[in-house]
Amino acid sequence: MSQGQSTENKRVTAKTHIAVFAFMIYFFLVVPFALIPLLDAIGLASSTVGAVVANGLFHLLPLLVYILVARQRPKAVLPPVSLGAKNALYIVGATIAANMIVLFVNFGHFNTLFNGATPEPMDMPGISSIWIPLVAFGLLIATFEELWYRGPVYAEYKRRGVSIWKIALMSGILFGVIHTGVFQITYTAILGILWAFMLYYTRSIWAPILAHVVFNVLNILLNPFFYLSDYSVFWDNHQTYTLIYGIAALVMIPVAIWCIRKLIVNNPVEKKAAAKETKLFTLGYWALLAVMIVVAVLTRM
């Protein structure tokens, strides 16, 4: 029996959704009503260290549970394949382009379409302590998140024979709804879908980790709030920032297209027919996506 025929004979059942369903219960019920109060009680909830510890508990604990319960080898869930210099270059190029587009929309007046009003700036650490958010949010938290969303969420559907489009959509939407605000939920979901395809073509967990780390680091380094002691300076030069990021985004769009095309060409993938789905799987899949959107609307806006 050929590999293609073997894939065709697979049947994807509703139990494939268990990992995502359990994580949603954990993240939206256990985390806010148990873990966050615990971190708050020991004085970690509002600190950078607390943010890193919390994110680790949110994502690494479910990862460990999944590996043990599903009896999966860590290398199968988190394939540590070397990326190579070319793949790394293409991933970084595409990520820089995506970051420019997000910054343009974020700092431009376009964010009023999502938030209803220009958001007030938040307190940010000064340049002297910028290494703290770079390590905490740029490196550690980005890595923790990828180890789950492009780890078990991706691997569980892939080993069952689900199509990459459905895997990318599921992992991307789930990644989006853990964030806050319509704008952030939207662009993180899109990035999550893109990073799932990076994993698909490179077959390496290092691909989405690299993309996520680069994106977060650039978001910190290019955020004016990190460098300004007087927020009015930013708002007085708002149009200048918007113009700069707009030009950068326009220039980087063809770069992003080129990088993504080269990444695909550089990593040929044998196309396989998706496994047959039971009706319960299909209904469960779309129901889960619908529930995620509803949860995001009710709790995260």
Image: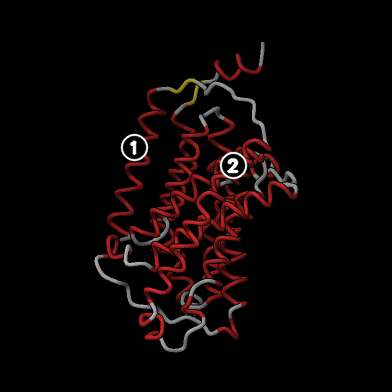
Name the residue: 57% across, 53% down. Answer: 146
Q: Position of residue 212 (x, y in %)?
A: 57, 57
Give left or right: position of 195 versus 110. right
Q: Is 57 drawn above or below residue 128 in the view shown? A: above
| Image coordinates for residue 97, horizontal then vertical, percent | 53, 56
Colour scheme of the rendered structure: secondary structure
First in sequence, mark 1 or 2: give its number: 2
Query: How many numbered marks have been drawn onto this rendered protein structure?
Result: 2
Crowd tier of the residue under label 2, counting other residues whose Cα lies within 10 Å: few below 14, some 14–19, many 20 or above: few
- Residue 112: name its quadrant: bottom left
Q: Residue 126: where, in percent of width, then height?
A: 53, 85
Instruction: Return the mark for residue 69.
Output: 2
Q: Residue at x 65, y 18 (%)?
A: 3
Q: Secondary structure at mark 2?
A: helix
Q: Residues within 10 Å of mark 1 (few under 14, many from 20)?
A: few
Please identify the quadrant where the C terminus is shown. Answer: bottom left
Q: Amino acid at mark 1?
A: Ala
Q: Which mark is residue 287?
A: 1
Q: Compare residues 222 and 39 and report the one nearer the observer.
A: 222
Q: Secondary structure at mark 1?
A: helix
Residue 20, x across and y down, in percent = 46, 43
Q: Which mark is residue 262?
A: none
